[in-house]
Amino acid sequence: NAGVTQTPKFRVLKTGQSMTLLCAQDMNHEYMYWYRQDPGMGLRLIHYSVGEGTTAKGEVPDGYNVSRLKKQNFLLGLESAAPSQTSVYFCASNERDRGYSPLHFGNGTRLTVT
Amino acid sequence: AQSVTQPDIHITVSEGASLELRCNYSYGATPYLFWYVQSPGQGLQLLLKYFSGDTLVQGIKGFEAEFKRSQSSFNLRKPSVHWSDAAEYFCAVGARSGGGADGLTFGKGTHLIIQP
């Protein structure tokens, strides 16, 4: 039972390079999210998806793009990395619920942009 | 839009002592409320949640939280902490509308230090 799996776990980029973070969940969850975590800032929502083929902007979407071509996968892309994007990125998912299904989190990707 | 305030950035507690972590929220109605814990290098794990009904909710690892509407608070408590409780704790709110589709709003976290 893997839950939410993020790859890679660590990455170092130079300013201007691009990369894609992959999130995969095996719980058949409808909703998926990308958060970033910075010291003293808590978690802030970057983008989210309410289903396959859909995406929406969260609180801090600038500089990031996402895609959800398959229900189980949610990709986060950085087209031209900047030092301000140095952070720990967390993917999460939950299921459609009449109430509120709690989020399940991956273990994070630590990204450093030099 | 909802918001969450965790007034304490760091808290130090002796092992075996009681613990209370504070959380205040801002929302137009009663939101869904959560507490998550994050151990170093790990993702977030759900401790407990409040949706409706009994305002005192029990969670895993011996934690409980009390929802107080009049104070817009959802404080986390534990009667006796263990060294393994040292971690970062996050309070979060979810809007009643949206059915859980638009994510949670998190507080900035409280770092719990346990001293022997």
Image (spheres, coloured by chain):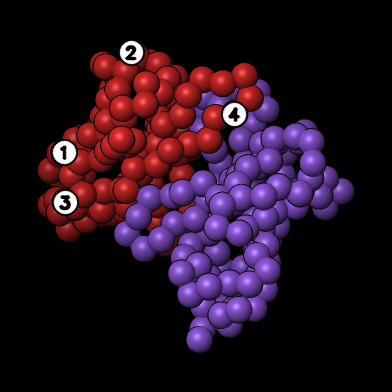
Q: In this view, does B94 lie to the left or right of A40?
A: right
> Disc 1 marks which residue?
A19
* Quadrant of the snapshot with the N terminus of chain A: top left
> Label 2 marks which chain's residue?
A
> Label 1 marks which chain's residue?
A
The amino acid pointed to by label 3 is Arg
> Disc 3 marks which residue?
A11
Colour seen for chain A: red
Callout 1 touching callout 2 (CB < 8 Å): no
Label 3: how many Cα within 10 Å (few below 14, some 14–19, many 20+): some
The amino acid pointed to by label 4 is Tyr
* B101 to A37, vertically: above or below: above
Label 1: how many Cα within 10 Å (few below 14, some 14–19, many 20+): some
Callout 1 touching callout 3 (CB < 8 Å): yes
- Which chain does purple denote in the image? B
Residue B84: % across, % down: 46, 69
For the residue pair B2 and A105, the one nearer the viewer reads as A105
The amino acid pointed to by label 1 is Met
Residue B56: % across, % down: 76, 49
Same chain under badges 4 and 3? The reply is: yes
* B106 to A31, vertically: above or below: below
> Label 4 marks which chain's residue?
A
Callout 4 touching callout 2 (CB < 8 Å): no
> Disc 2 marks which residue?
A53
> Disc 4 marks which residue?
A100
Residue A30: % across, % down: 42, 20
Closer to the N terminus: mark 4 or mark 3? 3
> Label 3 marks which chain's residue?
A
Rendered image quadrant of residue A60: top left
Mark 4–mark 3 Cα distance, whole angstroms, equals 33 Å
